[in-house]
Image (spheres, rainbow, N blue to C red):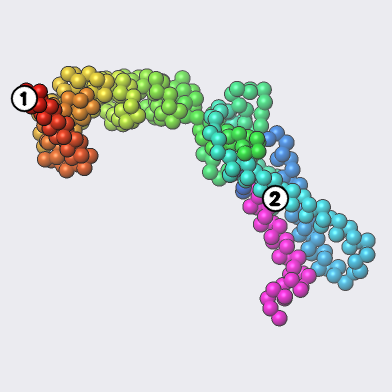
Amino acid sequence: MTIFTFVFGNGWLRGLLGHGVATLACAIALFAQTWFRVPSQGFFLLIPYVNVAVMVLSIVLALNHVLRGRRDDDPLRSLILTAERVSGLCIRVFVLWALFLFANAALDRAEGVVKEADVVVIASSDADLRLLSHAWIVLRRVDEPNRVERILWSLFDPPLHAGKPVLLEVRPGFFGLPWIALLTVDDVRANLAVLRTSPTSAEAWKMLIKGYAIRAQVPELVNATVQYTRLHPVDHDFPEIIALGLGMGGFCDGMHAVLSRFVGRRTDYEFYTHMGYALACMKRRDEAMKYLDKAIAMEPRNWWAYYHAGYMFFDGQKFEQAKPYFAKVLAIRPIPDVARDMATIDKILALKRAREQATRN
């Protein structure tokens, strides 16, 4: 006798296996619904019935074992069979709904829309129905203050409490059923509230600035960082990080606005180099060279200021002026991109000399 025959030929073991599969399927379905969350007002009322259905299947399993000698047409057996079928149908609907939510999210390729909301309350399932324990979050959207909706709480959610402002990334769904792809704390609204009571809190200002950066609200980001430098002038590192991020994003005006707060207070190589880069990006070459020359004079063996000066002239098609700076960079550090652009300059200058020679002849 094989194990397969032994298990499926034994009614008790077959029922036990089926019960285990049903419980596992419900647990996976619940987890899927906490991952691909659809805002709802009434759906959560159904989850306790799924809990009851799983409990009924457990009771049915035990009764079938106790009453295994009864005839199939026995009224009690018929009642048990009906309960088993109804419970199985409830579980199947729950699992199929989870599969539908999975397909709705997995096939969705649309961009999400960020919505502001506030946590109203966080609640959990009743203590006597914890076969499929779950918790949910009641939310009130800022753009719909008269309407509340529930979403299942996920293990991946940040720490939340009633009144916490959050951001919801809502996507339309492949089947037109909007779902929440991401829930994060709204650092902007949360820290603005903190700053109303503690206007000099350094941590609140930093979190507010980070919130603006996440939202790509550049003017607000720059203004908040400038205000932070006024309140905390001894902190050079955090504003410098923000300024470099602005420069990497191409927001050179913002980078310069933040760094200019330290003119006269910082005289180090990094500051001069960053200011030179910001001004060069703004096409203010003469001012940029003043800072880059100061940096070069401080650390003539550091390649970074030469690099910025070289590309400032290269991007402006001032190839004769760019060449000596590229040469300095390559003498200190062989960078492939610089070597490639140096070769391009040599070709351009050779063509220029050939054209001038041809003109003279």
Rendering coords of residue 20 (x, y %): 69, 61
Q: Residues within 10 Å of mark 1 (few under 14, many from 20)?
A: few
Instruction: Give residue 269's mark.
Output: none
Q: In the visual, does 358 lie left or right of 218?
A: left
Residue under the image location 78 percent in, 70 percent down: 11
Which stretch is magenta? 1-30
Position of residue 82 in the picture relative to residue 113 (left or right): right
Which residue appears at 66% of the width and 48% of the height? Answer: 99
Is residue 25 magenta-colored?
yes
Does 71 lie within the magenta span? no
Specify whether 49 is left or right of 143: right
Kindly identify the amino acid type of the residue bearing the numbered disc 1.
Asn
Q: Judge whether residue 47 can be spotted in this image.
A: yes
**Type of amino acid under label 2:** Val
x and y, in percent, of residue 295 in the image: 14, 28
Q: Position of residue 52 (x, y in %)?
A: 76, 51
**Residue at 54 percent of width and 40 percent of height:** 157
Q: Pointer 1: what residue?
A: 361
The residue that label 2 is drawn on is 95
The image quadrant of residue 338 is: top left
Say which residue appears at 51% left-offset and 35% top-offset. Answer: 184
Q: Say which quarter of the image contains residue 342.
A: top left
Q: Is most of the magenta stretch helix, strand or loop?
A: helix
Which quarter of the rendered picture does the N terminus lie within? bottom right
Circle 2: element type: helix
